[in-house]
Amino acid sequence: MLIGKNAFAVSLLLIATLSAQEQPPKNRERLSLPPAAVAAMNGISKQSIETHVRFLSHDLLEGRGTGARGGDIAAQYIAAQFALYGLKPAGDNGTYLQKVPLVGVTPGADTRFTFIPSTGAPADFKNMDLKMLDDYVAYDQTQQSVSDIDAPIVYVGYGIVAPEYNWDDYKGVDVKGKVLLMLVNQPTNDPNLFHGKALTYYGRWMYKYEEAARKGAIGAILIHRTDMAAYGWGVVRNSNSGEKAYLQLDGTPKLKAAAWIQLDVAAKLASAAGLDLDKMMTDAQSRDFKPVQLPVRLSAHITSKVRPFESNNVVAVLPGSGALPVASPLKDEGVLYTAHYDHLGIRPDMPGDNIYNGALDNASGCGILLEIARAYAESRMKPRRSIFFASVTAEEQGLLGSEYLGKHPPIPADKISLDLNYDDVRPQGSAEEVEVSGAERTTFYPVVQAAAEEFHFAIRPDAHPEAGHYYRSDHFSLARVGIPAFSINEGIKFKGHDEAWGLAQDQDYVEHHYHQPSDEYHPGLDWTSDADMARFGFALGWQAASQTGLIGWKEGDEFNRPRK
Ligand SMILES: [Zn+2]
């Protein structure tokens, strides 16, 4: 496919000095980049990546907090690099910066959450006062300092509407102005549904809140069960105390109470209402499930400290050549690269080293993004479609910068063929594997496979599809507006090491450094693997920018719907 007809096309294989026997069969997908592109790709330098990481993770940048000085310095640094490369600004008003308006919401201590009996409740149903953090957590997504709720509670099972699985938990029931009680995760009894055990977006709490709000509900309460959520109440509690950031209101429907309750509390509530929680859970496994209105109301008084602030995405573009292999306006189409630059900032109350430098998470991805951008900018030949580079903010706050980018893309989302994202790419020597989870859901996958083969990378499958990692990095924000998107990362196999070594590195990182001040830059690490991932992504992006037609989602995929 793609540049095969180009007389100047040179297979990567020739460059990579491989033996002829290793060439893939003729009729397979082949990567073939023009020599100028190959030269640009080979110029990607691990020293440059390392240099960017060293600066971006310096203590002076104070952990690159969203809306904080260090984060803003990082954004300015990245914008300056884009300018030095000669890339064009693609942010607001002819600048590289795209303003992302944010709001911090902190629940007030005087917030009150009570279940009260209504018509049909058993006579012995007494008001149930809930204790914040122990029994429940709740955020007011409507960003008001005070919201009051007095509304009936409707149990909606999993709260899922998934046309591609012929599944609708709402069954047309009007839930406007009501509070919805629902289960986390997705039905699991039928392996043919919802990708079996692999978590789909429908199983994520974010989706459930969004669907409830779209249906006009004013509140949604998720029932936490450790095995269903894949994490304990402690995680829910920790990630739902203190300030939480949101995009400023933009007309998207929001909930006055986006809440979770403990399993015990849900069981008590059900039995007080004359119901059986276990049976309710079993009923929800069926496609024939219908919503059940409980003889209970939620009476809530929710107070919040509301703090508007702002941060910026950094966006640049290399305009495409528009050279026409086919009659299509390729110049108006693009390929996007993303990597978040924000991290967790400083914790002033913490003794000792309290700077979250985020060298790997995600100065590493920024270094790669910048090197890819430089390589494209310096290439003597330009790709046909435009190439956009976006270093996004507020990833650690819930993918907010990329969500804003998805809602306000530099060109319409349906003209963006592909997003390639980098997040947390660790310097571990020479990579022998690549992880591209989500790529298999797109029509681009044969090209990805061919590229992996030519780079001599084995494709490592997602080890924990039930954990839903696909929904936890910035590419997902682009996927949800319809853009085929995935992250590129290493697997666990590196040259000169066995799998056990890779797994041990993984474990050490997760246990001792991930989201900790010790995620710092150290001299002497081998950044070869980061350059490997950068070249691989460069090749994929070039192919996507050159091929006939835009990339799509495969038939039946949850994201395969008209792009907005
Ligand atoms: Zn992170």
Image (tube, grey):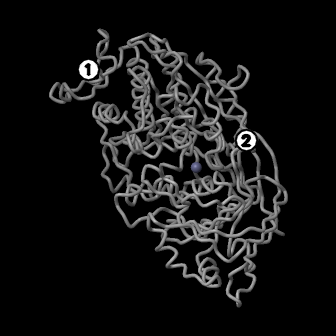
Q: From what the image shows, is residue 498 above or below residue 3?
A: below
Evaluate whether residue 281 shows in this view: yes
Dot 1: few (<14), some (14–19), or many (≥20) neighbours within 10 Å?
A: few
Q: Which residue is mark 1?
A: 14
At x 67%, y 77%, the residue is 295
> Which numbered disc, 2 or 1, marks the residue that appears first in the sequence?
1
Name the image quarter holding residue 494.
top left
Q: Position of residue 474 (x, y in %)?
A: 55, 42
Q: Is residue 351 left or right of residue 522?
A: right
Three-letter code for the amino acid on which mark 1 is drawn: Leu
Q: Position of residue 228 (x, y in %)?
A: 49, 68
Residues packed near mark 2 inside 10 Å, few (<14), some (14 to 19) or many (20 plus): few
Q: Quadrant of residue 533?
A: top left
Count of number-bearing discs: 2
**Residue farthest toward the left in the current orientation of the protein:** 21
- Which mark, residue 109? none
For mark 2, what is the residue? 250
Secondary structure state at the residue bearing disc 2: loop
Label 1's element? helix
Residue 449 position, x and y percent, is 31, 36
Asked if residue 42 is positioned above or below residue 518 in the image, the reply reads above
Residue 318 in the image: above or below residue 97: above
Amino acid type assigned to the residue bearing label 2 in the image: Asp
Viewer-closest of 412 and 231 = 412
Between 131 and 376, the one nearer to me in the picture: 131
Query: Residue 489: x percent and y percent?
Result: 43, 42
Which corner quadrant holds the N terminus?
A: top left
| Whether residue 504 can be seen here | no
